[in-house]
Image (tube, rainbow, N blue to C red):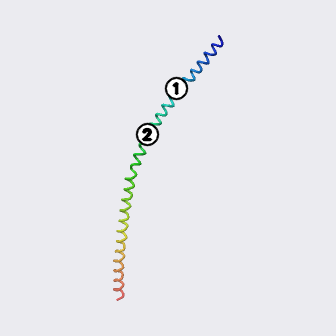
Amino acid sequence: MGNLLKKSILLMAIFALFASCGDIAKKVEDKMKVLNEKTLKLDSLVNKEFSKIPALDSLINMKGDKIKKLDSIINKSSSKFDSISNEKINLLKKFINK
C-alpha cells in the first residue's frame, strides 16, 4: 500500500512537471511571437528609412552643385571687383601724381 502511494505521488509529480513545462513552452512561444512581430515592424521601419537615403543623397549632391556655382559666381564677381577697383586706384594715382 505504501509502495502504491509512493508511485502515485511520483506519477503526480511527473504529471505536474510536464504540465508546468507545457505552460513554460506556451509562454516562450507567445514571447517568440511578440518578438517576431517587433522584428518585422523594425525591419519595415529600417527598409522605409533606408529607401529615403537615395533621395537624400541626390538632394545633397544638388545642393553641392549649387554651392559650387555660387562659389564660382562669387570668385568671378570678386575678380571683377578687384579689377575695377585696381583701375580706379590707378586712375586716382595718375590724377594725384599729375
- Residue plotted at (39% across, 46% down): 48
Q: How crowded is mark 2: few (under 14 residues within 10 Å), some or many (20 or more)?
A: few
- Relative placement, left or right, of 39 versus 91 is right
Extreme right residue here?
Answer: 2
Q: Position of residue 47 (x, y in %)?
A: 41, 45
The amino acid type found where label 1 is placed reads Asp
Place residue 17 in its image quadrant. top right
- Residue plotted at (43% across, 45% down): 46
Q: Report the residue marked by disc 2.
A: 40
Q: Does residue 80 sit above or below 31 in this rendering?
A: below
- Relative placement, left or right, of 2 versus 56 is right
Q: How many labels does the image show?
A: 2
CA gap between label 1 and label 2 equals: 26 Å
Place residue 94 in its image quadrant. bottom left
Q: Does residue 61 sit above or below 13 in this rendering?
A: below
- Residue plotted at (64% across, 15% down): 6
* Label drawn at residue 23: 1
- Residue plotted at (55% across, 24% down): 20
* Label drawn at residue 43: none
Nearer to the camera, 70 or 42: 42
Q: Is mark 1 on a helix, strand or loop?
A: helix
The amino acid type found where label 2 is placed reads Leu
Q: Residues within 10 Å of mark 1 (few under 14, many from 20)?
A: few
Place residue 40 in its image quadrant. top left
Nearer to the camera, 86 or 94: 86
Q: Where is residue 77 in the image (x, y as percent from the top left)?
A: 34, 71
Q: Quadrant of the N terminus?
A: top right
